[in-house]
């Protein structure tokens, strides 16, 4: 069976209970998560062998993060240790017209101080068929960007399929200017076979945007065909890419989103149905759950891109009903929703 490796930062998430604001909180709920670890958990839930690579502090909090991965069935033996602290992020969950807020406290985290040579990538990628990274990792620090570039080069040399979720995070890119950031992301993305990103990711990283569409003005009225130009421009810039995928989130309110996706393979554009996600429980990790579902779909249905894309969108739709960063659903649950059963009835 195909084995997957993901690489990035896992953090301690602290959030006021329910929809309380930071100023109202007297306690915080604890969750461990991060873009690449969330993808790993999804894949483990679907029965795909997966290792998560990161750098953790050798203390009790680092051990808790590691144990969270282990209990979800993710391989942790490639994790390296060092540094003094685990990154933290604070989440205030929005509702209706009040959006969610994230405050980062991840400066000098263990992985921010990673350097090339610390991870034995040849050993990591032995008997591995797929490697996944996101744009969050190189945003953490120059060292993390250099380690990620080291990883994609080794993975490429070893014939491993490489995917990315571009994941632009304005609050993280602090150590370099825009030109340097674009070079870092261009260098990394040039090694990728599968590229996932929304319209903001493409515009912020590469200056690529949907022709004739301002998603902020169009609100929830997002049409799939508007993003064909983005996919074509991305493939032109990154000729190694076999597929470019875009998620389509329409934000009616913080509690009600529409959700769909498109995939372009260089000749054909695939589109999913649009889901209406109302009364959102937790939208953090929605894109990660899409990526986890997409990797599973492409590995499981290698000759059926439409089915792979449909699986990814249904999986991430379900994630919005689950508290926490990770998508804790099964293949059967995703396939049930793909089949049109969105009743939510009790399973007895």
Image (spheres, grey):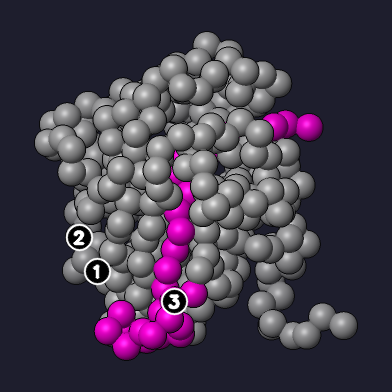
Q: CA distance from mark 3 to mark 1?
A: 36 Å
Give whichever of 31, 229 is nearer the camera.
31
Whether residue 313 appears in this view of the structure is no
Tell me, yes or no, whether the highlighted magenta stretch contains residue 19. yes
Label 1 residue SS:
helix
Residue 127, x across and y down, in percent: 70, 21
Q: Secondary structure at mark 2?
A: loop
Tell me which label, 2 or 3, sits earlier in the chain: 3
Q: Is residue 198 left or right of residue 35?
A: left
Asked whether the residues under the numbered discs 2 and 1 touch, taking CB atoms below 8 Å apart as contact, a structural biologist would say yes
Stretch in magenta: 1-29
For the N terminus, the image quarter is top right
Kindly identify which residue carries mark 3.
Answer: 28
Q: Residues within 10 Å of mark 2 (few under 14, many from 20)?
A: few
Q: Quadrant of residue 72?
A: bottom right
Quarter of the image where one finds residue 125: top right
Q: Nearer the viewer, residue 22 or 131?
A: 22
Q: Above or below — where is 21 with respect to 196?
A: below
In the rendered view, tell whether residue 63 sits above or below residue 30.
Answer: above
Kindly identify the residue that appears in the image at 20 percent across and 60 percent down: 214
The local secondary structure at tag 3 comes to loop
Instruction: Say which mark, if any, is on residue 175.
Output: none
Q: Residue 316, located in which quarter of the rendered image? A: bottom right
Name the residue tied to disc 2. Answer: 214
Residue 345, image x and y in percent? 74, 85
Q: Residue at x 21, y 66 (%)?
A: 216
Q: Dot 3: few (<14), some (14–19), or many (≥20) neighbours within 10 Å? A: some
At x 57%, y 60%, the residue is 326
**Tag of residue 218:** 1
- In the displayed structure, 219 sits above or below 239; it is below
């Amino acid at each position: 069976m195909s084995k997957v490796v993901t690489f990035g930062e896992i953090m301690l998430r602290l959030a006021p209970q329910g929809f309380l604001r930071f100023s109202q909180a007297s306690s915080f709920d604890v969750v461990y998560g991060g873009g690449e670890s969330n993808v790993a958990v999804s894949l483990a839930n679907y029965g795909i062998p997966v290792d998560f690579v990161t750098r953790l502090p050798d203390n009790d909090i680092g051990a808790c993060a590691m144990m969270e991965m282990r209990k979800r069935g993710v391989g942790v033996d490639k994790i390296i240790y060092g540094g003094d602290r685990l990154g933290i992020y604070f989440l205030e969950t929005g509702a209706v017209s009040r959006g969610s807020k994230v405050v980062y406290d991840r400066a000098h985290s263990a992985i921010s101080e990673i350097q090339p040579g610390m991870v034995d990538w040849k050993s990591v990628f032995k008997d591995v068929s797929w490697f996944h990274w996101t744009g969050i990792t190189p945003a953490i620090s120059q060292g993390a960007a250099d380690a990620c570039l080291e990883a994609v080069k080794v993975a490429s040399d070893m014939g491993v399929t490489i995917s990315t979720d571009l994941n632009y995070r304005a609050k993280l890119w602090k150590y370099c200017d825009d030109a340097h950031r674009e070079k870092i992301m261009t260098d990394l993305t040039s090694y990728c076979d599968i590229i996932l990103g929304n319209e903001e990711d493409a515009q912020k990283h590469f200056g690529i945007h949907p022709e004739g569409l301002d998603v902020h003005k169009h609100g929830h009225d997002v049409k799939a065909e508007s993003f064909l130009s983005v996919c074509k421009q991305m493939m032109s810039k990154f000729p190694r890419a076999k597929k470019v995928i875009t998620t389509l989130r329409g934000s009616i309110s913080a509690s009600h989103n529409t959700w769909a996706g498109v995939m372009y393979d260089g000749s054909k554009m695939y589109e999913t149905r649009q889901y209406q996600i109302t009364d959102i429980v937790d939208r953090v990790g929605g894109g990660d759950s899409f990526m986890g579902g997409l990797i599973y779909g492409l590995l499981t249905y290698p000759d059926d891109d439409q089915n792979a894309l449909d699986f990814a969108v249904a999986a991430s739709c379900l994630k919005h009903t689950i508290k926490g960063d990770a998508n804790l659903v099964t293949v059967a649950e995703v396939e049930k929703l793909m089949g049109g059963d969105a009743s939510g009835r009790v399973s007895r």
